[in-house]
């Protein structure tokens, strides 16, 4: 399957991406998870080549530009990036596919711009993280204190490729193959060492989170048919907020699958089957 690099317009700078599959197939605009990149969807695209896969590196991730100096990677700004991407691609409508952070962005975008989204696929994510009103001030202070730590910005250097792989394995529930897939785009070798391309500022907490009530009210505005894939060993299966969010989305299909948070990388064949069945059943957003 041929894959080509894309340069797309973002809210605060150019965004990189990958396009694969059938140029005349239904367009799937794909948004990856936190600290991942567009390569996250490569294994799915290989198994479903009849779709037009447009996979975006979100700002500060992969090969995309960082936010400007002094800027914060605030959740709502990603919505502007998605809007600009669709304009850049001259897509009036598309299917949004998101994993984790990307699933939350896709869900909120689908609610905000229902005329632009035919179908919505969410992989182990359903809306943004909600804040606890009891620790709002603590969260705000922690976020602002991050701005004073200059060593937390920009790309990071590691003494070896294996060191980066092992650190990524320790950070989350993901297979070695999945890590290698993400690092193939998210890191570059420099001599004997490795540079991780993602901006260190991505680790800054958001200054303010929406409440669960606000998130639910937004999700209730999703008009497109939606698929939520819950990894049984993932992040949202046992969250107290998940059940209420599921109930809020008017036209939602649920699929529980075995696997961890990066199940789309660890078991792409099974995931491709689930996604393809939904997309075919709800073709044209019906």
Image: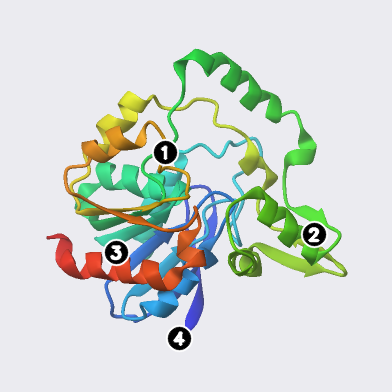
Camera-near label (1 vs 2) is 1
> Which residue is rendered at x = 69% and y = 24% of the image?
145
The disc at residue 1 is 4
Res. 71 image quadrant: top right
Q: Give whichever of 15, 188 is nearer the camera.
A: 188
How many marks on residues?
Answer: 4
Residue 16 in sight here: no
| Rendered image coloring scheme | rainbow
Q: Residues within 10 Å of mark 2 (few under 14, many from 20)?
A: few
Where residue 187 sits in the image (x, y, percent)?
70, 63
The tag earlier along the polypeptide, 1 or 2, is 2
Which secondary structure, mark 2?
Answer: helix
Which secondary structure, mark 3?
Answer: loop
Marks 1 and 2, Cα distance to the nearest angstrom?
31 Å
Q: Give whichever of 127, 61 is nearer the camera.
A: 127
The disc at residue 91 is 3
Marks 3 and 4, Cα distance to the nearest angstrom?
23 Å
The reply to whether the C-beta atoms of the residues labelled 1 and 3 are less than 8 Å apart is no
Camera-near label (2 vs 3) is 2
Residue 235 in sight here: yes
> Which residue is rendered at x = 32% and y = 71% of the image?
273
Q: Which residue is mark 1?
A: 238
Q: Which residue is mark 2?
A: 163
Return the residue found at the far left.
286
């Amino acid at each position: 399957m041929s894959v080509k690099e894309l340069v797309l317009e973002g809210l605060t700078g150019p965004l990189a991406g990958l396009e694969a599959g059938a140029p005349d197939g239904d367009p799937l605009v794909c948004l990856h998870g936190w600290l991942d990149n567009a390569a996250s969807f490569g294994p799915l695209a290989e198994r479903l080549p009849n779709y037009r896969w447009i996979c975006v590196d979100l700002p500060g991730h992969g090969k995309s530009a960082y936010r400007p100096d002094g800027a914060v990677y605030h959740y709502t700004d990603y919505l502007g990036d998605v809007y600009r991407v669709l304009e850049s691609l001259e897509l009036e409508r598309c299917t949004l596919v998101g994993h984790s952070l990307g699933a939350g962005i896709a869900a909120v975008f689908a609610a905000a711009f229902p005329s632009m989204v035919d179908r919505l696929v969410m992989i182990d994510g359903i809306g943004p993280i909600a804040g606890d009103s009891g620790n709002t001030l603590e969260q705000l202070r922690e976020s602002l204190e991050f701005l004073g730590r200059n060593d937390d910005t920009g790309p990071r250097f590691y003494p070896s490729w294996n060191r980066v792989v092992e650190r990524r394995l320790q950070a989350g529930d993901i297979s070695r193959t999945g890590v290698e897939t993400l690092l193939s785009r998210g890191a570059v070798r420099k001599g004997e060492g490795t540079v991780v391309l993602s901006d260190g500022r991505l680790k800054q907490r958001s200054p303010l989170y929406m409440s669960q009530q606000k998130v639910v009210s937004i999700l209730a505005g999703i008009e497109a048919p939606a698929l939520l894939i819950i990894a049984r060993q993932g992040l949202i299966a046992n969250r107290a907020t998940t059940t209420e969010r599921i109930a809020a989305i008017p036209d939602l299909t649920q699929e529980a699958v075995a696997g961890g948070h990066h199940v789309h990388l660890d078991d792409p064949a099974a995931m491709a089957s689930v996604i393809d069945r939904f997309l075919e059943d709800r073709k044209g957003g019906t």
